[in-house]
Image (spheres, rainbow, N blue to C red):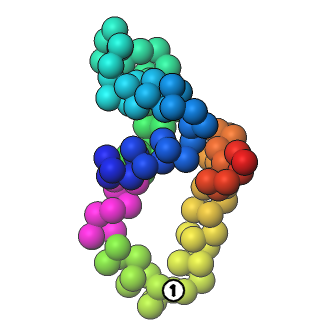
Amino acid sequence: MVAVMIGWVFFSQTNFSALGHYLGALFGIGASCFADTTALYYLKTGLILFIISILACRPGLYRRFRRLIQQKPAAALLINLILLALSVAYMVYNSYTPFLYAKF
């Protein structure tokens, strides 16, 4: 995952000085503390999504959902639509661009 994160830096920066500064900041070079106010803000706003993601990765929840699909397909469809609406709402709230080349 670290290699992927470093690889994305090469796409996002346009000159070598900015590239070096960004890579240094990525590894904490020049940082005064472990987490600043911006990092704490992002941690606080993304905490609910982080907890939901951890719970959704559990194998027991997956087995229950597979059983729900077999027994009540309409309920499973409704759950998927609710999750889709929540995902879109979260992306709009954070004004996140999910596309790599939206900046170019």
Residue 13 is left or right of residue 21, and the answer is: right
Residue 56 occupies quadrant: bottom left
Residue 57 lies in the magenta-colored region: yes
Pick the front one: 71 or 58:
58
How many residues crowd around disc 1 within 10 Å: few (fewer than 14), some, or many (20 or more)? few
In this view, which residue lies farthest toward the front? 16
Q: Is residue 23 above or below residue 28?
A: below
Residue 81 lies in the magenta-colored region: no
Residue 100 is left or right of residue 57, and the answer is: right
In this view, which residue lies farthest toward the left? 59
Residue 86 appears in the figure: no
Q: Is residue 61 above or below residue 20?
A: below
Pick the front one: 35 or 67:
35
Residue 97 coordinates in the image, percent (x, y): 66, 48
Residue 21 coordinates in the image, percent (x, y): 45, 24
In this view, which residue lies farthest toward the top? 32
Question: In this picture, which residue range is highlighted in magenta?
Answer: 53-61
Residue 24 is left or right of residue 97, and the answer is: left
Q: Which three-letter amino acid code belongs to the residue tagged 1?
A: Lys
Q: Which residue is mark 1?
A: 72
Overall secondary structure of the magenta section: helix
Residue 67 coordinates in the image, percent (x, y): 38, 84
In this view, which residue lies farthest toward the bottom? 70
The residue depicted at 57 percent of the width and 71 percent of the height is: 80
The residue depicted at 66 percent of the width and 59 percent of the height is: 85
Where disc 1 sits, the SS reads loop
The residue depicted at 45 percent of the width and 89 percent of the height is: 71
Residue 70 coordinates in the image, percent (x, y): 44, 91
